[in-house]
Image: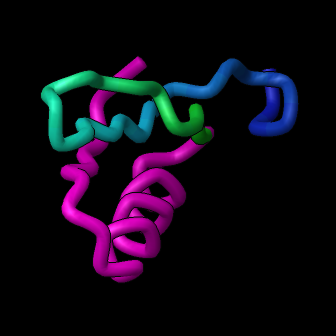
Amino acid sequence: MNAESSPPRWVVWRQDDNGNRYEVRRCGTREEAEALAAEMEARGHKQLYWVAAA
């Protein structure tokens, strides 16, 4: 199974000001997921973003 056909293994999550949690996106690599979480955090919103294994 190659990288294009393997299932996403990492999830970027967001928690809003009310404590609600949402899945933002599934990514194939941790590096991709971490980069997305950092990009979202850099926007300056109060939400919390983190990466977890799928």
Residue visible at 46% across and 27% down?
23
Q: Quadrant of residue 8?
A: top right
Residue at the image point whose x is 73% and y is 23% from the top: 6
The quadrant in which residue 31 appears is: bottom left
Q: Which residues are magenta?
A: 28-54
43 relative position to 51: left or right = right
- Residue at image point 52% right, 37% down: 24
> Picture quarter containing residue 1?
top right
Between residue 44 and residue 40, name the one nearer to us: 44
Residue at left offset 24%, top offset 46%: 50
Locate residue 49 relative to residue 10 in the image: left or right: left
> Where residue 51 sits in the image (x, y, percent)?
30, 42
Quadrant where the C terminus is found in the figure: top left
Which residue appears farthest toward the front when viewing the image?
Answer: 18
Q: Residue 10 placed where, x, y %?
A: 45, 33
- Position in image of residue 47 (x %, y %): 24, 53
